[in-house]
Every structure is written in C-alpha cells, then in structure tokens.
Image (cartoon, rainbow, N blue to C red):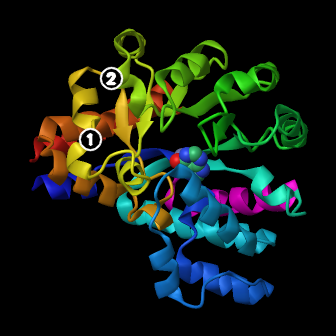
Amino acid sequence: MSLLEFIKKSPKAELHLHIEGTLEPEQMFVLAKRNNIQIPFKNINEVKKAYNFSNLESFLKIYYESAKVLIKEQDFFDLTWAYALKCKEDNIVHAEIFFDPQTHTDRGIDFDIVINGIYKALKKAEKEFSLSFKIIMCFLRHLDEKEGFKILDQALAHKDKIYGVGLDSSETGNPPSKFEKLFRKAEENNFITVAHAGEEGPPEYIWEALNLLNVKRIDHGIQCLKDEKLVEKLSKNKIPLTVCPLSNVKLRVFNKLEEHNLKKMLDKKLMVMVNSDDPAYFGGYLNQNLIETQLALNLSQDEIKTLLVNSFKSSFLSEERKKEWINKICEISKKL
Ligand code: HPA
Ligand code: ZN
C-alpha cells in the first residue's frame, strides 16, 4: 500500500469544519433557485473566479453572502447530508462540525430550523453508515458579546444536540477577551469550549483563549510558533491545534503550501492534525488537504500516522472509541 492509499483508507476524525463552508457552488445555485434568492453570480465560473481571496476578511464577505440561500430546514439538511456523504468518501468516521447560528438568525431564520436540519442529517448518517459526530455552535466574534448571550440562550433549548461552543469570524481586533463572560456562562451550562485563535491574529490571542475562555482546543493556532513560551505550554499540555493547510494558503497566511509550518509544529511535538475548514471555498476536503500537504512538505509515513492518530486523540470521543480507531490506524499502517 502506498502512502496515498494509507491516507485514503485510514479512518479519520475531522475537528475543524464549518458546515456553511461546505456549500458547493452547484448547490448554491440549486438553493438560490428553489428559494428564489438573488445571488451575485451568473454561473459557476463566476463563482470560482470570486473565490480568489486576499485574507480572512475577503473570504468572510463572500461566505456570509452565499449563506443567504439557506432558508428552510430542508436546505440545512441537504447541506449537511452532502458533507456526510463526503465523510463516507474520505473515510471520515467522526466529525465535530461548527455551525454559525447568528449568520442565519440575523436574516430572520429561526434557530430551530438551522439546528434541526443539521442534526437530522447527521443522525441519518449515524444510522446509515455509523458516522459519529458532535455539533459545536460558534459565536461570531465581529458581533457584540451581548448578541452572543442571546444566541446562547436559544441554544439552551437544544443542549441535547449541541456539544460545545466556539468562536469564529474576523479575528483581528476581536480578541477572545471580548467574550470572557459569555464563555463562562457557556461552561456553567456544560458546553465544552474551543476558539479560533492565531489564524491571522497574534500569539496573545491564543494565550487569551486558553487563560480566559478555558478552551480545550485551539482552532488554527498556526501563529503560536512566534512565541516559544506558548509552544512549550501547548506541547507540554498536549493542547490540540486544528490546523487547516489549504485554508491557510487560500487566505494567504502562507504564500504556498510548501511554506506551511505544519512540519515545524510536528517537530516541536505539538498536538496537530489536518482539517478542511471550509472545503467548498478552499479547494478540497480532508483527504485532499492531507494528500497535498504530504506532497508539499514531504511528510513521512510516521508523520502522516501521527496526524491521523492525533485527530482521534484530540476529539471529544470517549477514550474507548479513541483507542479502537487508533488501533485500526496502526493495523493499516503496518501493511504499508
Ligand atoms: N476563520 C474564522 N472564521 C471562519 C473561518 C475561519 O477559518 N471559516 C468560517 N468562518
Ligand atoms: Zn475555521
């Protein structure tokens, strides 16, 4: 078996995936027509041309605009079901997915419509091909903390479906400290916490996420290498960093994949794994991210195995389930 086959055949967990970021251009057109929504694109080619981003902000503008085609529970179901089928294709056996309720409630869509569509599709995938999952609700950090409290109140009615809370959207100028009280309240209500930090923003934002928001994982975290003390803490405490290589190149954090710091992070024994972030916008799902990164950084079989094992170690699965999947990876890697 080649390294490429190992990547494809191995079971994987995906821990950094925005469900709104799986809206493929084709599906955007279908939903726009179905819901009679105007979109600023005439055809798929125009969409693909527009997906030429200069930074996080330029991406978010298009990402929020495109999400406007999602109106009914069926739309959220179809969106999520399409991602579940990608999981099956890529051998993703466990997915911890983000959704951004404020992107929808701010347009007058009910919270219930959003969460029920997503949840029902994941339950169907669980039943039909044993995909396990957790749902994490993200607060939009460009909005006020007060808005976050409103959405958290709504989430309480769906505590059975939502496992944790996260923080996404425009990082620069919106530090984790802005949401300290909100995250405390989320924890008091037994939500686990994660946060995007150190994607474009400075290492200080990662410190804040750890110290003020008490996060169990850092999403992205790639800027941590600028701070030696931080690297020491992250590696000593095995705090997971959910790295998204194709996203980082598309949003110009690195000029090209060959310049990505994932290998350096592995060398420093950081708890990193690969994720796809917003695959419909960034050029590929999980296997594509792994394959392109392996080629660009010349990652060894051992390094690939570490990334795959880390995806389970860093998940919110039970210790027993983690062990089962990690044993499977070890079995497959022996056949290489
Ligand atoms: N960063 C911040 N916000 C986001 C992202 C991201 O990578 N994807 C979707 N919302
Ligand atoms: Zn993200």
Residue 107 screen position, x and y as percent = 85, 63
- At x 16%, y 53%, the residue is 295
Segment tinted magenta in the rendering? 111-133
As displayed, is residue 64 above or below residue 188? below
- At x 70%, y 43%, the residue is 137
Main SS, magenta residues: helix
| In magenta stretch: residue 314 | no
Residue holding disc 2: 270
Tell me the crowding category of disc 2: few under 14, some 14 to 19, or many 20 or more residues within 10 angstroms, Cα based.
Answer: many
Question: Label 1's element?
Answer: helix
Q: Of label 1 and label 2, which has the lower sequence position? A: 2
Does mark 1 have its CB less than 8 Å from ligand 2?
Answer: no
Question: Label 2's element?
Answer: loop
| In magenta stretch: residue 124 | yes
Which mark is on residue 329?
A: 1
- At x 46%, y 34%, the residue is 321
Residue 265 screen position, x and y as percent = 28, 28
Q: Nearer the viewer, mark 1 or mark 2?
A: 2
Residue type (three-letter) at the residue carrying disc 1:
Ile
Tell me the crowding category of disc 1: few under 14, some 14 to 19, or many 20 or more residues within 10 angstroms, Cα based.
Answer: many
Residue type (three-letter) at the residue carrying disc 2:
Leu
